[in-house]
């Protein structure tokens, strides 16, 4: 884990780098093609920041990861229950993947959730083909909630639900 990792809300100046990192993190492993409709959602950092919370992780002053935080009833929430923080669109710059950055970011999300009044859990959805992410979440105590799994409307993409009580 980067010792000097700073986790904080994204500023407008971060948006181009958040967009690049998110795009690269989803395209390089082949999760989606560049023309997939979800890519426009991932790349619209301005909209996410307006309707949810865009956060970044920085090391030595450079953005190396990004994530969106949201809560039940908000536009970007897909599965959050009352008193639950949901995180989405976690993306680590491919240049630093495999060095514990994703784990460090999820731990910072856990710390942040524990600092929020009335938050008792964290939730995330993850496509079935994102096996590395599943291993990360489970190693940090997240549990699968198969009853909450759902298909992306109009697509053959099953999303698994993971939850963690905090």
Image: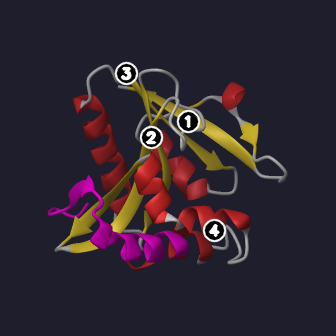
The secondary structure type at the circle numbered 3 is loop
Q: What residue range appears in magenta?
A: 1-23
Q: Which residue is mark 2?
A: 70
Q: Which of marks 1 and 3 precedes in the sequence? A: 3
Q: Residues within 10 Å of mark 3 (few under 14, many from 20)?
A: some
The residue labelled by disc 4 is 39
Residue 162's tag is 1
Q: Residue at x 70, y 35 (%)?
A: 149
Q: Which of the two marks, 3 or 1, is nearer to us in this view?
A: 3
Q: Estimate the x, y position of residue 111 in percent, counting from the top left.
A: 25, 38
Q: Is residue 119 above or below residue 161?
A: above
Q: Earlier in the sequence, mark 2 or mark 4?
A: 4
Residue 38 place in picture, x, y as percent:
67, 62
The foreground one among 67 and 93 is 67
The kind of secondary structure element at disc 2 is strand
Rounded to the nearest angstrom, the CA distance separating label 4 from label 1 is 23 Å
Which residue position is annotated with label 3? 120
Mark sitting earlier along the chain (3/4): 4
Which quadrant would the N terminus be assigned to in this image? bottom left
């Amino acid at each position: 884990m980067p010792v000097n990792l700073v986790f904080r809300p994204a500023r407008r100046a971060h948006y181009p780098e958040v967009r690049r990192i998110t795009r690269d993190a989803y395209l390089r492993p082949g999760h989606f093609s560049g023309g997939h409709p979800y890519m426009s959602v991932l790349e619209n950092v301005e909209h996410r920041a307006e309707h949810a919370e865009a956060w970044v992780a920085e090391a030595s002053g450079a953005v190396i990861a990004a994530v969106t935080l949201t809560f039940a009833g908000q536009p970007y929430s897909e599965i959050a229950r009352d008193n639950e923080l949901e995180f989405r669109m976690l993306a680590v710059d491919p240049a630093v993947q495999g060095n514990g950055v994703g784990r460090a970011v999820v731990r910072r999300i856990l710390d942040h959730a524990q600092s929020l009044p009335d938050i008792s859990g964290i939730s995330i959805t993850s496509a079935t083909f994102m096996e590395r992410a599943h291993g990360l979440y489970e190693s940090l105590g997240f549990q699968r909630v198969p009853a909450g799994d759902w298909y992306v409307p109009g697509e053959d993409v099953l999303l698994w639900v993971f939850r963690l009580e905090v």
